[in-house]
Image: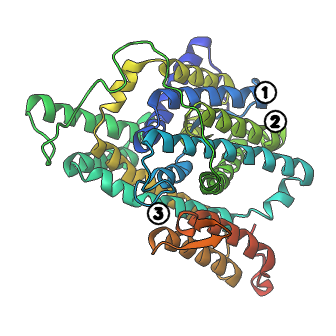
Amino acid sequence: MERKLSNGGRALMGLQHLFAMFGATILVPLLTGLSVQVTLLAVGLGTIIFHVIAGPKKAPPVFLGSSFAFMVGIRLITDPVAGPFAGTEMYQSEKLAYATGGIMVAGFLYLLLALLIKLVGVKAFMKYLPTVVTAPTVILIGVMLAPFAINQSAGNLLLALATIVIIVAFSVWGKGMSKIIPILLGIVGAYLIALLMHFVFGMTNPDGTEILSFGRAGTDIVGLPPFMAPRFNLLSILIMLPFALATIAEHMADMVILSRISGRDYINDPGLVRTLCGDGIATIVGGGIGGPATTTYSENVGVVTITRVFDPRVLQLAGIYAILLGFSPLFASLIYSIPDAIIGGASFILYGMIAAVGIRNLVDEKVNLADMKNCIIISLMLVIGLGLRFGNPITIAIGETNLPLDRLGVVIAVIVGIILNIILPADKSLGKSEK
C-alpha cells in the first residue's frame, strides 16, 4: 500500500533519495576526472528534465544519477597509453571534452530508439535487443573496469581494504536505510579512518604522499561550476555509443520493477517513449555542460521499494537538492579530498556488481543456455570485447584512416551480438530460447 506524505515528509524523503544516489554518483567524477560540481548539477537537472517530459504528476519515481556504464568509454578515450589521443600533447581536460561530446551523441540514441518503439511497439523492438545481447554488454562493462579498481587502490591498501570491509558489512548485516546506502557509508567510514591516520597519527601513504589534501575546487561556499564545452571526434563517438544500450536496458528494467511494486503501468503511462526521451535529453544536457551520462538509479528504486512512497515530487526535490550542491565549490573540495584508495576500495564492489547485474539479467529473464544460439552469442561477445581490449593492439586501414579495433571492443561485440541474434536459428527442441 502506498504511503502518503506531508510537505515536510516529502522534503525529508527527498534528502534520503539524495543520500541513496550520492555515493555512486560522486564516484564517476572522482574516477574519470569530470567535475564534481558539474556532475551534481547534471544529475539534478537530468532528473528534473526527465520528470517534466514524463509528466510531473505521473512520472515514475526515479532519480537520474551518473552512469557507470559510460565510465568505461570515458576511461578508454582519456587513457594516456592506449586511448585515441595517446602520444599527443593534448591536456586531460581536452580528452574529457571529446568524451562528453561522445556522451551527447549517445544521448540521441535514446531518442532514436524511442522513435523505433513508437513505430513498431515494445515487443517488436525487444526482439532486436534481447537480454542475450544486453546482459553480456553489462558483464563486459564491469569486467573491463576491474583493472582501474586495482590501480586506484594500490596507493594505500589499508584504506582500500577498510572501505571494502565496511561496505560488505552494511550490505550483508545492515538494516533499513543502512542497507540501501552501503557504498556511501563505506566511503564515509573509511574517510573517518583516513582523518585519524592523517591528523591524529601523522601517517602518510606508503609512497610518502599525504593521505588527505584539501582545497582543490576552492573554499567559496557558493560559486559557478566549471562548465566544459564538448568536442566531437568520430572515434570517440563510436567508443561511447554502445554503452547507451546498457543504460537503456537498465532503464527498461527499472520501469518494469517500478510498475510491479507500485501497481501502476509505467511502461504504457507515461510510456517508454516519453521516459526514454527524458533519459536521453538528460544525457544530452549532461554531456553538453561537461558532465556524465545519466541513468535511472537502482539505488533509488530500492528506496522506493522499501518506503512504498511513489510520489514523483519526492524525487524532484532530490533533483533540486543536487542542483544546489552543484553550486558549492567548498562542498566539491570536501569530496575531492577523499583519498584515491577509498574510491578504489568502493570500486571493487561497484565494478563487480555491474558484472553481477549482467549475470543476474540472464538468470531473471531465463535465458536458455542449453540453446547453442545463446551460448554462441554470449561467448563471442565476451571474447571479442575482452580480447580486443586487453589483447595486442589491432588496427585496420580504411582508406587513409587507421581504425584501432582494440579501442572499439564493446562496439564490435554489441554489433556481432545483434547480428547473430537475428540470423541464427533457435533450437526449437529446447523450447523458446529467449523471452
User: Please, what is the three-letter code of the amino acid marked with disc 2?
Assistant: Pro
Asked whether the viewer can see residue 136, the reply is no
Image quarter in which the C terminus is found: bottom right
Q: Disc 2 marks which residue?
A: 270
Q: Which residue lies furthest to the right in this view?
A: 119
Give the mark nearest the N terminus, 2 or 3.
Answer: 3
Viewer-nearest of labels 3 and 1? Answer: 3
Residue 313 visible? The answer is: yes
Q: In the image, is residue 412 above or below residue 232?
A: below
x and y, in percent, of residue 38 in the image: 51, 28
Q: Secondary structure beneath disc 2?
A: helix
Q: Which amino acid does label 3 sit on?
A: Val
Looking at numbered disc 1 in the image, what kind of residue is underneath it? Gly
CB under 8 Å between callouts 2 and 1? yes
Q: How far apart are marks 2 and 1 (CA)?
A: 7 Å
Q: Residue 213 is drawn in which quadrant?
A: top left
Residue carrying label 1: 55
Q: In this view, does 414 lie to the left or right of 79?
A: right
Q: Mark 3 points at which residue?
A: 143
Which of discs 2 and 3 lies nearer the camera? The answer is 3
* Residue 156, image x, y percentages: 21, 48
